[in-house]
Amino acid sequence: MKYIIFLLFVMFSILSCSKIYNSEPDNRNTMYFPPNTGDEWDTIPSSDLKWNDNAVADLKAYLVLKNTKSFMILVNGRIAMEAYFNGHDADTEWEWNSAGKTLVSAMTGIAQNEGLLSINDRSSQYLGTGWTNMPESKENLITVKHLLTMTSGIDDTKQWVNKSNLIYTADAGSRWAYGNVFQKLTEVVAKASNKDFESYFNEKLKNRIGMDGYWNFGKIFTIYHSSTRSMARFGLMSLNKGKWNNEQVVDGQFFNAGINTSQDINPAYGYLWWLNGKSKYMLPGSQNVFQGTLIPNAPSDMYAAMGALDQRIYVIPSRNMVIVRMGKASNPDNPNFAVSGFDNEFWSKINAVIH
């Protein structure tokens, strides 16, 4: 009798455990963050996402045609698609170009959250009086926020950011113009933190989310280089409004302000982020205002890091999705613009897969 009772108890326990196991929710719908070290990264099959696998070949052919080096899609942090072309692989480091502006934005937010600076401070508080070739009264109008929003009023036609080129065009806050003067933010952060910018970056951002890569501080451009997966890591943190796993790396309030319209002149620009879904937009190298949304084929809630040669991080909150593209210029006749005709056509190919 005792043996029968024991056997019944064992059978009941097995059935109970089986019931609990089978009733567990599918955690692939929860947000995932890869470990900060090693190559481990969860994946999710496209079949689970009900994507159109018949359109994948056309998308990859387009990527090859447009000189792409690497391409990734994350859904809830998991890799749904990862492809490399033209000798590029998961370990190859590549230039972010102006997509790296968003890294500088993040570092400015971190420094502010640590009480080292305020974006409403005069830039000269950190750069010293006479950092431009402007009258002091005009220079004093330029705040850290003006550098974050491309509204410094400094001439945007000269790419080399040295004092002789930093000349007055308009009062700070009255003109939006895309240029390289944002690079002065690296000096602002360095002065505020009392560390060189790359050391502060490595400590406060790179190491905290498991990125690789390095900064190249050239005479004309300040450019970050990393692997594709590191670019995706930053995109994943950005999807989560500055949060990595359970750690708020970039202050959430600052980050949210940065992915929303930052000034009244170009609604499609935040704190060095490009914003889709606005009623009008401006582009680099022009004072023209265009009606309509920045990338019509892309989701309206998308915000993006965009760099020359079509380096891209697209962040789409409504889909819990991050898309990364690295490579050479998709259009060799127009290689330098951060926003090119590439994006809208690219999104038509992506939509054919994910819709």
Image: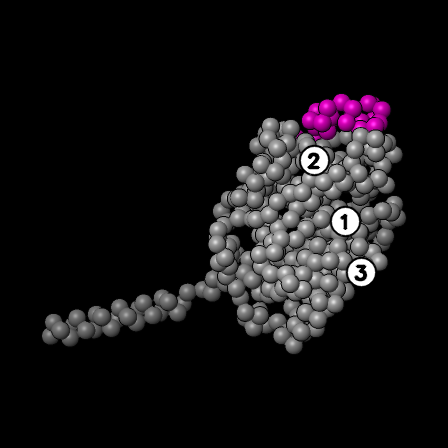
Label 1 or label 2, whichever comes before in sequence order: 2
Residue 18 visible, this angle: yes
Task: Nearest to the eye among marks 3 and 1: give it.
Answer: 3
* Residue 86 place in picture, x, y as percent: 67, 64
The amino acid marked with disc number 3 is Asn
Q: Which mark is residue 185?
A: 2
Which residue is labeled 1 in the image? 268
Give whichever of 88, 53 is nearer the camera: 88
3D distance between C-alphas at marks 3 and 1: 23 Å
* Residue 306 place in picture, x, y as percent: 72, 51
Q: Estimate how packed mark 1 is, as few (under 14), some (14 to 19) or many (20 or more) residues with alpha carbons within 10 Å.
A: many
* Residue 75 place in picture, x, y as percent: 58, 61
3D distance between C-alphas at marks 1 and 2: 21 Å
Q: Estimate how packed mark 2 is, as few (under 14), some (14 to 19) or many (20 or more) residues with alpha carbons within 10 Å.
A: many
Which residue is labeled 3 in the image? 331
Residue at image point 26% right, 68% down: 13
Q: Which mark is residue 82?
A: none
The magenta-colored residue range is: 118-141
- Is residue 191 rendered to the left or right of residue 4? right
Q: Is residue 296 magenta?
A: no
The amino acid marked with disc number 2 is Leu
Residue at image point 69% right, 45% down: 223
Q: Is residue 133 magenta?
A: yes
Residue at image point 57% right, 48% down: 212
Locate the C terminus by quadrant: bottom right
The amino acid marked with disc number 1 is Ala
Label 3 or label 2, whichever comes before in sequence order: 2
User: In the structure shown, which secondary structural element does the residue marked by tag 2 occupy?
Assistant: helix
* Cβ atoms at labels 3 and 1 below 8 Å apart: no
User: In the structure shown, which secondary structural element does the residue marked by tag 1 occupy?
Assistant: loop
Labels in figure, total: 3
Label 3 or label 1, whichever comes before in sequence order: 1
